Amino acid sequence: MKKFEILRELPKCDTETQNSETQEEVVRDIARQLAQIGDRMECSICPGLVAGLAAQFGNTSLSEEDRRRCLAAALQQLTQLYPADVDREKTLLLLTLLVAKKVADHSPAVLQDVFHTTVTFINQNLLAYVRNLVQNEMD
């Protein structure tokens, strides 16, 4: 999958009255809701985890797949902090975005690698969830 497939794969509008502005409003509303939840979750991400991931992203000998595995392992560790009855996909999406932000803030030099790995991770693990989230908001 390509870097920005998550954005290209958003559902197409069924009628002419639903245009790109409507879809953009939906995406902004979802982002606003996720940001509010994310603000409450951010404290669960410890500085040691962020520093470790930043070091791994800065390691040029690691492949993209190795970086993705490192990110997945960190996210697995974080998701265990949340009860099983919490929506797993929503939790994983929010933690993925929060971890990416924190790692990039910690080590701006790895921003491009963090972004690329995060988009790849979302495309591989959460694309269907993101599509459903957008579709449900548009209905």
Image (cartoon, rainbow, N blue to C red):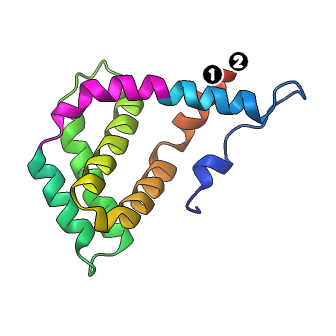
Q: Position of residue 123 (x, y in %)?
A: 51, 51
Q: Is residue 99 above or below residue 51?
A: above
Identify the residue at image location x=21%, y=61%: 54
Magenta residues (range): 32-46
Q: Position of residue 115 (x, y in %)?
A: 42, 58
**Three-letter amino acid code at the position of disc 1:** Asn
Q: How crowded is the residue under tag 1: few (<14 C-alpha within 10 Å), some, or many (20+)?
A: few
Q: How many numbered marks have been drawn onto this rendered protein structure?
A: 2
Classify mark 2: helix, strand or loop: loop
Residues at circles 2 and 1 in contact by the CB criterion of under 8 Å: yes
Disc number placed over residue 136 in the picture, else none: 1
Residue 35 among those drawn in magenta: yes
Disc number placed over residue 139 in the picture, else none: 2
Q: Quadrant of residue 118?
A: bottom left
Disc number placed over residue 112 in the picture, else none: none
**Three-letter amino acid code at the position of disc 2:** Asp
Q: Position of residue 52 (x, y in %)?
A: 14, 59
> Quick one: 44 or 81, which is closer to the camera?
44
- For the C terminus, the quadrant is top right
Q: CA distance from mark 2 to mark 1?
A: 5 Å
Q: Is residue 11 left or right of residue 56?
A: right
The overriding secondary structure of the stretch rendered in magenta is helix
Q: Position of residue 91 (x, y in %)?
A: 34, 31
